[in-house]
Amino acid sequence: MPLRPALAWLIPALVAAIAFLPALHAGITPEDWGWLALTRHLDDPAVVLRENAFFTYFYRPVGLAFWWLTAQAFGADGVWHYAANLVVHAANAALVAVLGNALARDGDADRPWLPGLVAGLAFACAPAGIGTAIWLSDRFDPLALLFGLAALVAGERALRRDSTGAAIASAALLLFSLTSKEVAYAVAAALFVRALAHRYATGERRYGVAIAAVAAVIAALALRVASGTATTTTGAQAGAGAIVEGALAWWRYLPHALFGFTSASLHPLAIALVALLAALVIAAGIVAVRRRSAYAMRTASIALVLVAAPSVLQAPIVRLALANDAGVLSLNLRFYYLAAAGIALAVPAIWTLLRGRAARAVCVGAFGALCVVGLVLSHRIASRWTDLYAADSARVTRIGEALAARDFPPGCRIELAMPDYSDDVRTHIDTMVKGAASRGASLMRCAIFAGRPVYNTVVDARDCAAGAWPGLRIAVANGHDLVDRFGNLCTLQFVEPDHAETGANVFPFSVDAQGRVASPEAAP
């Protein structure tokens, strides 16, 4: 019996890890290499607090610090980078269970561990969760949820015990969440609403939790302003019309996200399962109102905000990413990661509030079916991810290691002939090669091309000026050169050069389908 509370969070963590396992050997994707190149060669990790990278409009020092830690520890070994993501995702499943039990503390006396177990399993099996967790470039969402859930757990302790220490811990954890990704403002709203709901339900004055939510938001905004990060988004309109359009798109694709964006159209059985779940939630809500359930009020104050708020917070970007069915890609499941936790927290309320045998039988059947389907789809998404990226990751690692072993002069241009590689690889070739290269490699003072425009070039900060690049022109946007310094590094975007051009500073190589680099041609 004493083991059950521990099993309530341990089992969801294990199930989440099992769903993730096929992606362990997926390798690093083209976009991932950019974050790896930046953080692997960064000398001072404190820079992530003061500056921003890659011309971004967001401020996410916690996510960048996590990248720096894994880059220093694991280099370009994708298995260990994925293992780190697996741990974070499994911890989120465990925390959903812990929070679920904290919210249901006066629920089923015979099974006090049940609500947490159900909530944790619902999250662990969610394809929207695994689709986000396996993408290294979006470590920001799992980290935001990790610290956000921990903040909500600490908030529950503060409300229950009137603990100042727990309220302070909640504020600190929420600040970590807010500086992981902006969607965490949904967590801040949930914590604040939870404090109001507690005051309404019990009459107790627990101002510490509300103050914690407000203080963390103020601190996060102050850090953002101090870093010089712009408050407007790049390439995304943030007007009222755009927000409404984006939010509607988010809700339109929510049922698809529950099944992992496996297709642009849902199978009739999937539609029936979603409709059944929605009906059960509505029925449970009606029963909760009639019974004046304190548990339901606690759960709703958090779960509903976690589900609804992300649709508004992410609306300008969702409007572009999910403009049509072409956006139904596993990487866009990131927009639903926090919402998956909110939905999972609401699921056990159905069991707790519907007490008839028939009703509970329907609940068990629907929940079991959703978990099985979700786990199968999650496993399929993770396996597909490995199929897509493992081969290219291994080949790019060989290219990076081969070029890093050579000596190049500052300001050089490396031209790679890579006919056997995708446009995606060739567009990210500079950061891919440099992410695979060890620190101190001379190619960090070179620009690398593969016959296409390169998305971003990462170089030593000594070469941040246009004069350091003979034969290359820095791109311009909105009247400004696309150059951005980041600690001892610099990110640039160049106008596409003539790839057939030769010269003393141009080093051509050929790369075969296995990633072997041929000796350069003699420069004239």
Image (cartoon, rainbow, N blue to C red):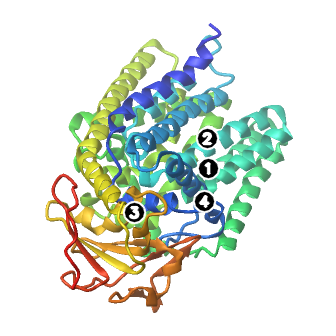
Give the residue number, with chain letter if any, for mark 3.
434
Q: Nearer the viewer, mark 3 or mark 1?
A: 3
Number of other residues with Cα within 10 Å of mark 4, as a class: few under 14, some 14 to 19, many 20 or more: many
Amino acid type, label 4:
Pro
Asked whether disc 4 touches disc 1, contact meaning CB atoms under 8 Å apart, the reply is no
Q: Local crowd at mark 2 within 10 Å, few (<14), some, or many (≥20)?
A: many
Give the Cα distance between marks 3 and 1.
36 Å
For the residues marked 3 and 2, what is the alpha-carbon distance in whole angstroms? 35 Å
* Tag 2 near tag 1, CB within 8 Å: yes
The label shown at residue 187 is: 1
Identify the residue at image location x=72%, y=68%.
Answer: 222
Question: Which label number is shown at residue 149?
Answer: 2
What x and y, as percent, mark residue 106? 69, 22
Q: Secondary structure at mark 4?
A: helix
Tell me the residue that label 4 is attached to: 61
Mark 2, secondary structure of its residue: helix
